[in-house]
Amino acid sequence: MSSLSSSDQDTLRTIGENTIQSIVALCVKSALWAIYLVLIVMCMRILLRKRYGRSAPFYVIFVVVFVMFLMDTAMFFIDINDTIKVVSYTLTSNANLSLQDRLLLTYTLPYPVQSAMYAFMSNLGDIIVIWRVLAFYPRGSGRWILAFPIALLASSFVTSGLISFCVAKFAPEEAAAGDIVHPAFCRNIQLTSYCTTLVTTGFATLMISYKTWVYRRDIGRHVHESLNNAVRIERIATILIESGVLYFLFHLQAVISDSGAIPALEHSTVGLTFAGTIWTYNMSHVMAIYPAIVVILVHSERSYIDNATMESMNFAPGGSRSGQLTTVGPTWTVSQTATTGQGTQPIEINVHELRTAPSFSEPGKSRVKAGGSTEDVPGDIERGKEYGQ
């Protein structure tokens, strides 16, 4: 019985390590896919409830989430097929080929196709991100700022199309182990795709953070102590901001891991290669799960920010007050109602136009006359003009 040469021993070791890594990564991916399946069922149940209607945003969100699920599931089954073929190519078939030639056959598996699918999935995820931002920027003078993330989204779709072109033209000869490595144009386009998604997520998160800060500055401090619903509004905004930061960090690692000498360092040891393989297998799951979680979290809180909110502050004669939150339109609005024994006079303040709000408890700013009418004291007339009253 002839012994294996040193090169064959190294090749056989590589085949064994690749097989073990693929099987372990596939087991982890199967567990995550099961979790994702549960989340997608919950998400679809929420979206299909009649009380959310059948508006254009509903169809967009439904289609995006469902298509992302289909694409992620397709990538999952491609991974299963690839793992089976790795074993077949290297161990059970091709007995007439050398071990080196068998190993080379595994590099012809459709890994680059998954790279193109991943790029389009990131575009769909960006649509969900921008959808959440739209809820904070209703129609008005400030909505022009949305042109920047929308332009980034369009750029992302262009880069995904170029990646698909590279996969179709160069993948069979110029790709290996799941990455587009040649020519340089295609390699740079893949990195550009990661960067545009990263910037879109980061800018959208900053926009939501700014609107949350405006809400807390102009409205939250007046109703925070009296209404639990105001706290719920802030909690939803905080969830979106924190999840946006995590999503940003997820895309940041993709940019870093594909830049400079980092890819070589990731394969410098067996342990790093093993961990990198498992992470690469599951990146599509992580990216697809994020939009589903956002939809579940927002709608589980009755989507106070996605729709509009009104705080109705009812002041009783004895100075007591009660609050009730209702949805009224595409803006955050606070309605303060002064109540006497004879009538009620509502005052509405739009948070998107508000700049400096007086405290509800400030004395001497206005008084209620007999009959329920109000009388402005000096200084209130100009302030009323500022608020558009």
Image: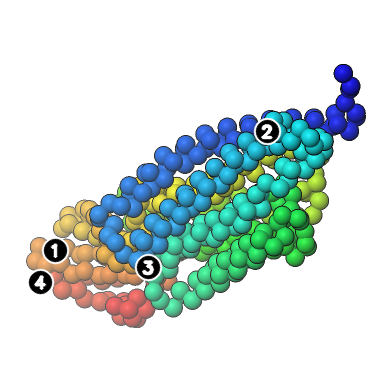
Marks 3 and 4 close (CB-CB < 8 Å): no
Tell me which numbered mark, 2 or 3, is placed earlier along the sequence.
Answer: 2
Read off the residue under disc 1.
340
Q: Residue at x 25, y 54 (%)?
A: 50
Quick check: 173 left or right of 299?
right
Discs 3/1, front = 3
The answer for how far apart the CA atoms under marks 2 and 3 are is 62 Å
Q: Position of residue 124 (x, y in %)?
A: 51, 59
Residue at far front of view: 96
Q: Residues within 10 Å of mark 4 (few under 14, many from 20)?
A: few
Q: Nearer the viewer, mark 1 or mark 2?
A: 2
As measured in the structure, the alpha-carbon distance from the residue carrying label 4 to the one carrying label 2 is 87 Å
Tell me which label, 3 or 4, sits earlier in the chain: 3
Q: Secondary structure at mark 1?
A: loop
- Between residue 135 and residue 193, name the one nearer to us: 193
The label on residue 371 is: 4
Q: State the residue position of label 3.
A: 351
Q: Which residue is denoted by mark 2 in the rendering?
A: 87
Numbered disc 2: secondary structure: helix
| Amino acid carrying mark 2 in the image | Val
Q: Residue at x 21, y 76 (%)?
A: 375
Tag 1: residue type? Answer: Thr
The secondary structure type at the circle numbered 3 is loop
For residue 121, above or below residue 139 = above
Q: In the picture shown, does residue 144 fall above or below 125?
A: below
Amino acid type of the residue that numbered disc 4 sits on in the rendered structure: Gly
* Number of numbered discs on residues: 4
Counting other residues with Cα less than 10 Å from the Cα at mark 1, is it few (<14), some (14-19), or many (20 or more)?
Answer: some
Q: Is residue 236 above or below residue 347?
A: above
Q: CA gap, disc 3 to disc 4?
A: 29 Å
